[in-house]
Every structure is written in C-alpha cells, then in structure tokens.
Image: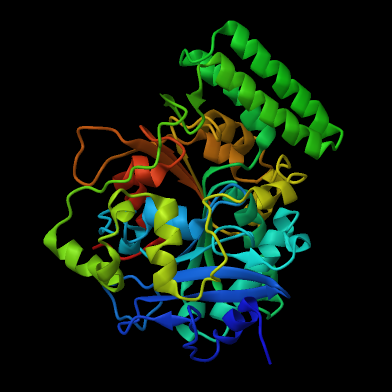
C-alpha cells in the first residue's frame, strides 16, 4: 500500500525506518537528544525537540526541571528561534552557547501552533483559530511525551513563553491543570513564565506613544496620532470587533514606523532592520565546549557549508538541521514565522488574557513575569499596566513591596535589573534588554531561570 509522506512520518515514530529521509524518533547514544512528531489531531503534526541537560549535578534518575519553550508570532518557530538564536545548546554557527538554559533545566522546544516551523497540517482548514485550540494541541503533545515516561512525568515542567507565546502559555497552564486533575495527563506543573508577553494588547498599544515620545523617537504629533489609533482599538475591542482591532494594530505600527523613522519595535534604541538576535557567542571555557559539543557531533561533517558559517537561520534549518533530523517532509520549507498561522488566529490576536493569569494565580501556580527595559511591542510600562488590573488577592501587598537589585554573578558594580516576589507572583525588570531578554542580557536571564526552576547551583 502506498503511503503519503505524512503517514510515513507518523509510522516511523513507532518503528525504525530507513527509506529516504524518513526516520524514527531517535536519541543520541548518551540520551542527550530526542525529537519527533506527534499527530495532535488527524492530519495535524506537531514537531518537538527535547534536550537532556548535561549539567545535572544530582542523580540523573531524580526529578530535574524541564522548560517547555513557546515562541511568539503567533507562528514563529521555537525549534529554530528559541533553540538556535536564544537559549539552546548551539548558536546559528553550530557553536556552543555559553549562556544556554540547559545549565538550569532540560529544554523542550516545539513548533506551535501547528503550521509553524517544522510542524505542518495536511489541510489548511486545520490551522488553529484561537489560543485555546493551540493549548489543546500542546496538551495532546504533552500527553504523548509525558504519560508513559516516568522520569518526565515526575519532573517539574515550566512553561516559558516569549511574546505572543505568553497568551498561549496561560491557556496551556490552565489546560494542563485540568488534564492532570481529570487523570488524562501525568505531569507536575512547576510554573508559568511570561517573558515580554502579549497578555493585554490594549495596554501595550496605549503604552507605545508615551514611551516613544519620552525617549525621543516620536514627537508630540506622532504621539497624538499613536494615542488616537490606540483609542480606536479600545473601542473596537469593547465592541468585540477583534479582526478590525488587529487591522488597526497593523495601521498603528505603520504610523509609528513612519513618524519614528522606523524604530525597532523590539528595541527602541535601534532602527528596524537591526537584528536584535545576536548571532555570536561569548568565549566559552574548554569545559563548557566539551560538554556542549556533544550536540554538534552529528553535524561536524556538514559544517563546511558557507551559509552555516554565516549564521543564517533559514539556510541552517532548511539545510544541515533538516538533514540531521531526517524525519522532516522533503517538501516542507522551514520559515521563522508562518503567515498562515497568524492569519488563522487573527480574530484572537488582540484578545486579553489577564483573566487567565488571575486564574493561574488563584489556583496557586507560580507565575513569573520578566520584561526587557528597551522593548516596545511588549513594553514594561504596558506589562505593569495589565498587572495592576489583576484581581489576585495578593496584588496590593505585591505592589507595596520594594524591589531587589539584580547583578551578573559576583559583579556588584553594575545594576542589571530588579525583582520582587509575593507568594506565587514574581516579576523581573531586566535593564539593557529589549524584547529578546535571553540574548540581550544572558547572564541575568540565566540567574532568573535558575531561581525560577529552583535548579541546583553549579
């Protein structure tokens, strides 16, 4: 019987396949990596990639924190961007990353929603249309990965999200709680971490004009135009006109770009087009190189490709990485952000998720919020605005608390941020960082992750 590429991929998750580029889910001999597809719905295939941390300082059989990384967009690739450009073991040059979050936890990257990155649907009607649908797919993936794996289901899972991924992370946290309580999922939820997250679009669009005016990227006239369109968005949201609000959001970004001479929405110190994701790493110690090079040993024979040396993510993901993984459909072209996914979710894009954060807090789930000082799209002032709208019983005490300064390791000469916590709400203000905190301030971000996951100190 002739099978489609998609059918072969799913079949090969269970048996060893050798035909063509298709191969079973696999792991290195030392167990450091595994990857594969989960058919979260008929004809909807979600790709995942799990790295086991080589930095474990306890008995490997004991529970160790696992971070599930959710990228933004919606439609951006966590397997590509979060992995190779932000917190994974290798950078886009396939060199060890000194600041990898594997130092504090295992890492599980997924391309979500289906249609992002290496994930795919066989019919366009299968794209998700809401955060709830995206969370449901992710819950199905977690059931497949965790339920029959005792090491995984006894380890605390931290859902860490960036940008739009934060909205999905909130819904996923609630979905996980329900699935665990109903006995459908064996998993211990350690917490939800919201990094520069698009939780309340209304609060963010109202923050843009004043922020950019204050830092001289918009003059008074530009700020007034920005505020006017933000008010239009507020009315549209109040009337339930969510698609129209998304269209006005696009118009607002264009107006701001025009009047600011193309400010970078991810870092107001930059112009648009200045890549905020660093493609270089700091000098690693010999020990760290030895530890992390295990992840690149299968790529050594392929690294002579010039485009890899140039650090181009698209070429990397469609070239040597696709060749390494072996199970990616041949006709699938990886992209860093799927327009089809964004379009399908357009009616949910501008919806607030503040109530979901309140629900997580009320259920006793640890919620950590971190924000880069220089971010525009998910500005710190916008984040503070939606936090003040929480109905959580501990908000008043949290607001009264003084912040503690953050430093990089033993250097107490430079303040790198601030933090404060009350009960199960934690907030980190990261100085000198834009939208991509792990890239802009890797040292402080790594400390924050260690504190959040309560991982043993190295």
Classify residue 306 as left or right of residue 434.
left
Residue 456 to residue 452: above or below? below
Instruction: Give residue 228's quadrant in the image.
Output: top right
Q: Residue furthest left?
A: 286
In the rendered image, is residue 452 in sight? no
Q: Which residue lies furthest to the right in this view?
A: 239
Residue 116 to residue 262: above or below? below
Q: Which residue is drawn at 27% across and 52% down?
A: 309
Instruction: Give residue 412's quadrant in the image.
Output: top left
Q: Where is residue 143 in the image (x, y as percent from the top left)?
A: 61, 77
Q: Where is residue 98 in the image (x, y as percent from the top left)?
A: 25, 55
In the rendered image, is residue 357 in sight? yes
Q: Which residue is drawn at 62% across and 24% down?
A: 254
Quadrant including the C terminus: bottom left
Q: Nearer the viewer, residue 379 or 455?
A: 379
Classify residue 4 as left or right of residue 153.
right
Q: Where is residue 224 in the image (x, y as percent from the top left)?
A: 65, 11
């Amino acid at each position: 019987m002739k099978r489609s590429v998609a059918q072969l991929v799913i079949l090969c998750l269970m048996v060893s396949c050798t035909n063509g580029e298709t191969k079973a889910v696999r792991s290195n001999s030392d167990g450091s990596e595994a990857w594969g597809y989960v058919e979260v719905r008929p004809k909807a295939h979600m790709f995942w990639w799990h790295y086991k941390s080589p930095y474990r300082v306890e008995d490997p059989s004991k529970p160790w924190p696992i971070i599930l990384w959710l990228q933004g967009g919606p439609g951006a690739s966590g397997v590509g961007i979060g992995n190779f450009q932000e917190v994974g073991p290798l950078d886009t040059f396939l060199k060890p990353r000194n600041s990898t979050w594997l130092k504090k936890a295992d890492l599980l990257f997924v391309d979500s929603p289906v249609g992002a990155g290496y994930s795919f649907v066989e019919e366009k009607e299968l794209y998700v249309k809401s955060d709830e649908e995206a969370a449901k797919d992710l819950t199905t993936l977690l059931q497949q990965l965790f339920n029959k794996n005792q090491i995984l289901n006894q380890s605390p899972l931290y859902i860490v999200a960036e940008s739009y991924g934060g909205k999905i992370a909130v819904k996923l946290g609630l979905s996980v709680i329900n699935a665990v309580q109903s006995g459908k999922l064996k998993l211990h939820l350690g917490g939800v971490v919201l990094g520069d997250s698009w939780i309340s679009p209304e609060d963010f669009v109202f923050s843009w004009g004043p922020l950019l005016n204050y830092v001289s990227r918009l003059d008074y006239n530009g700020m007034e135009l920005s505020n006017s369109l933000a008010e239009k968005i507020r009315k549209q949201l109040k009337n339930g006109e969510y698609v129209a609000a998304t269209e006005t959001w696009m118009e607002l970004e264009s107006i701001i770009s025009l009047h600011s001479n193309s400010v970078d929405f991810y870092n107001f110190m930059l112009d648009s087009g200045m890549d905020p994701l660093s493609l270089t790493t700091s000098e690693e110690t010999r020990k760290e190189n030895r530890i992390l090079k295990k992840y690149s040993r299968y790529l050594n024979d392929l690294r002579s490709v010039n485009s890899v040396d140039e650090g181009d993510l698209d070429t990397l993901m469609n070239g040597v990485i696709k060749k390494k993984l072996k199970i990616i459909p041949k006709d699938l072209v990886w992209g860093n952000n799927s327009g089809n996914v964004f379009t399908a979710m357009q009616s949910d894009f501008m919806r607030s998720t503040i109530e979901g954060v309140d629900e997580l807090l009320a259920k006793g789930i640890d919620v950590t919020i971190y924000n880069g000082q220089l971010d525009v799209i998910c500005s710190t002032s916008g984040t503070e605005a939606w936090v003040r709208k929480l109905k959580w019983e501990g908000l008043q005490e949290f607001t009264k608390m003084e912040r503690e300064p953050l430093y990089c390791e033993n250097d107490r000469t430079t303040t790198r941020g601030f933090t404060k916590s009350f009960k199960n709400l934690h907030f980190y203000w990261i100085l000198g960082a834009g939208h991509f905190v792990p890239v802009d301030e890797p040292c402080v971000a790594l400390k924050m992750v260690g504190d959040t996951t309560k991982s043993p100190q190295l």
